[in-house]
């Protein structure tokens, strides 16, 4: 009897350890997951005015046309009323593809929807110039479309990579 | 993925429903689980892992709480552990920046912090899972042993993004076995169309009206009241529209979810308003915070404390910003005022005057809700009462009243029960006419969605 009792308490003790092990494993997994998220997709909360001030120091950007909310709606199927802020410059000529647009979404779903719209905009631009606009296609093939935190960006131009670096260093 | 998108309505939903109705009943939970993951992952490819983790963790902790039923101390420790982990996730994504900014504001030290995007529906599924654990702890339910069944409860796509906060006990049997038939599908589809029309045709247009008004730095008293009336209606149609769609989708899948709204704008007191608005959240706070704190069965001082704590938390649940806390406390104070002072007077006056009083309180409350910046909040509130206003009435007010008159009139009518009662009678008398009306509403909503840009649900960000 004593042996059986000893075996039972031994099994119970093992089970308790197993449960502590499972709980610790779940917590460790959560910490690892949140750490990865924090380091990969997070962005500083920088006001759009501050982003605009920094980006507008680039003369290539301010040589483009500053676009308004209806243009944003036209090109990205989004309304600035539904997003936290935007910064949008685009070449005046319909034959030019230089453009920079940074949008700040309110949440991740909205950010993903904006990213889809920005990617669709790039695909649309490529469709327009494919076959005859060699210079435009070169710029479009090097365009940067992406998302970091709640920010979604579309950058197309000779300096797109520099704009991208400057923007990422801010957030 | 969102309900008010062409992709959801014309691709995801028909394919999913077709499969759901064709496969054997035993496989429906499996399909619902994977369908829900796809629905969530469509907009949240990274955060689907978080939602899965939450399901696994809470499923496991549910079985643990039940295993430790006879060991009070260990059961309590495990409950606290579960709450800490669930709330840690919520704080990490939702309140982390708010806490650091608040600490920075008090100490004067600016603490730079990166900002993570908020996983959609996080507050809703955290509260849903917590209610499951609390109910096991309180021995109201048994822990679900089948992971798939629990995972369906935890992740089901109709209510993932913006509620209602469905209790496990309410759908426990339906998770195992539910009836699907054409009649239930029809009722569900009709509810879905009603919700879609509320969101797309009313809420989105009211949003344009309100944001147009807010873009004026200076406004008259009438403009400010017109704006907040539009916002009051927008918020109701946005959120109740989502709830209708969620409940409708649930019906199409064979579930019966409790209603989340019960015509809150016909309430004759603030306390009645909160029994009719976001019912699932109100009952959550009542059952898991207010009653455990002692509810009203304590000294008056503690009762006051309980109400203020619950309402500050209700405010904070809505957003990581002090304006939401203020909004919650504002309601807490009005509920106390009604309970201790106004109740006896309110009973004596005509119900329409009580409704006007309630709506005034509610509309002023929505100003706290809509303006996250305290300066803008003060300015808007001041303008509504003539402080800093450009006058009582101006051409801007007349312009917005003229252009928004039909919309506001339809909105005021549509937030009362009469049109729906009429529609229910119509279904009985002339079913064909009811079908035509539904088809027209659906076609108009789709046309509007195609023409207009994507507009998120206001409550999805909570």
Image (cartoon, rainbow, N blue to C red):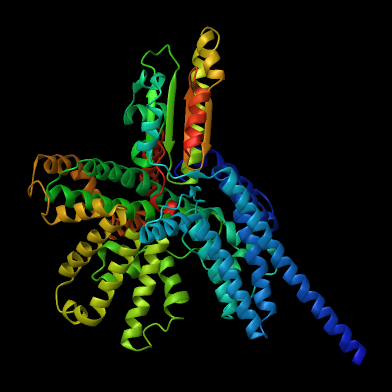
Q: Left or right of B138: which side holds B229?
A: left
Q: Left or right of B191: which side holds B255?
A: right
> Could you tell me residue A5's position as x and y percent?
87, 89
> Could you tell me residue B163's position as x and y percent?
47, 58
Q: Is residue B382 visible?
A: yes
> Could you tell me residue A10's position as x and y percent?
85, 81
Q: Left or right of B76: which side holds B415?
A: left
Residue closest to the eye, B43 or B409:
B43
The C terminus of chain B lies in quadrant: bottom left
Position above or below: A114 against B246: above
Q: Residue at x 68, y 60 (%)?
A: A28
> Could you tell me residue A130's position as x and y percent?
54, 12
Question: Residue B275, located in which quarter of the rendered image?
Answer: bottom left
Q: Residue at x 61, y 71 (%)?
A: B81
Residue closest to the eye, B308 or B212:
B308
Q: Residue at x 63, y 85 (%)?
A: B72
Position above or below: B300 against B391: below
């Amino acid at each position: 009897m004593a042996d059986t009792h000893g075996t039972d308490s031994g099994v119970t003790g093992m089970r308790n350890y197993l449960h502590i092990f499972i709980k610790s494993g779940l917590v460790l997994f959560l910490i690892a997951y949140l750490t990865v998220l924090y380091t990969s997709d997070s962005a500083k909360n920088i006001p759009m005015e501050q982003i605009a001030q920094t980006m507008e120091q680039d003369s290539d950007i301010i040589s483009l046309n500053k676009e308004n909310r209806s243009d944003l709606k036209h090109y990205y199927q989004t309304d600035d009323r539904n997003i936290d802020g935007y910064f949008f410059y685009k070449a005046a000529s319909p034959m030019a593809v230089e453009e920079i647009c940074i949008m700040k979404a309110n949440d991740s779903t909205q950010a993903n929807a904006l990213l889809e719209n920005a990617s669709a905009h790039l695909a649309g631009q490529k469709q327009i110039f494919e076959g005859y606009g060699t210079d435009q296609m070169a710029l479009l093939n090097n365009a940067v479309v992406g998302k970091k935190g709640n920010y979604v960006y579309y950058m197309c131009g000779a300096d797109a990579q520099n704009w991208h670096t400057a923007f990422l260093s801010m957030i | 993925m969102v309900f008010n998108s062409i992709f959801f309505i014309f691709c995801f939903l028909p394919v999913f429903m077709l499969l759901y109705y064709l496969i054997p009943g035993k496989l429906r939970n499996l399909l619902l689980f994977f369908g829900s993951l796809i629905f969530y992952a469509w907009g949240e490819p990274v955060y689907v892992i978080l939602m899965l983790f939450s399901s696994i963790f809470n499923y496991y902790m549910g079985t643990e709480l039940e295993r430790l039923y006879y060991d009070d101390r260990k059961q309590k420790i495990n409950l606290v552990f579960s709450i800490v982990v669930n709330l840690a996730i919520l704080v990490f994504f939702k309140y982390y920046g708010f806490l650091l900014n608040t600490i920075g504001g008090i100490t004067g030290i600016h603490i730079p912090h990166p900002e993570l995007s908020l996983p959609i529906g996080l507050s809703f599924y955290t509260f849903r899972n917590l209610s499951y654990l609390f109910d096991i702890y309180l021995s109201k339910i048994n822990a679900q042993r089948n992971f798939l069944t629990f995972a369906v409860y935890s992740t089901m796509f109709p209510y993932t993004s913006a509620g209602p906060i469905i209790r496990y006990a309410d759908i426990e049997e339906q998770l195992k076995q539910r009836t699907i038939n054409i009649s239930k599908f029809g009722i569900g589809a009709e509810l879905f169309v009603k919700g879609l029309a509320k969101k797309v045709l009313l809420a989105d247009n009211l949003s344009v009206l309100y944001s147009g008004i807010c873009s004026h730095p200076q406004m008259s008293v009438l403009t400010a009241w017109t704006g907040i009336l539009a916002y009051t209606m927008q918020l109701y149609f946005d959120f109740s529209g989502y709830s209708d769609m969620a409940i409708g989708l649930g019906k199409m899948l064979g579930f019966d979810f409790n209603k989340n709204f019960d015509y809150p704008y016909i309430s004759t007191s603030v306390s009645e308003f909160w029994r009719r608005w976001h019912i699932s959240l109100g009952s959550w706070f009542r059952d898991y915070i207010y009653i455990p704190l002692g509810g009203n069965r304590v000294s008056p001082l503690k009762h006051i404390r309980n109400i203020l704590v619950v309402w500050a938390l209700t405010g904070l649940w809505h957003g990581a910003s002090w304006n939401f806390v203020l909004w919650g406390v504002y309601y807490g104070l009005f509920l106390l005022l009604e309970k201790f002072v106004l109740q006896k007077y309110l009973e004596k006056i005509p119900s329409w005057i009580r409704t006007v009083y309630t709506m005034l309180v509610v509309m002023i409350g929505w100003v706290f809700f809509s303006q996250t910046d305290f300066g803008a909040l003060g300015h808007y509130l001041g303008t509504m009462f003539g402080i800093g206003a450009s006058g009582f009435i101006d051409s801007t007010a007349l312009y917005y009243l003229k252009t928004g008159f039909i919309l506001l009139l339809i909105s005021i009518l549509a937030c009362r029960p009469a049109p729906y009662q009429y529609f229910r009678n119509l279904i009985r008398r002339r079913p064909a006419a009811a079908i035509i009306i539904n088809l027209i509403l659906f076609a108009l909503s789709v046309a509007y969605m195609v023409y207009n840009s994507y507009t998120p649900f206001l409550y999805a960000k909570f």
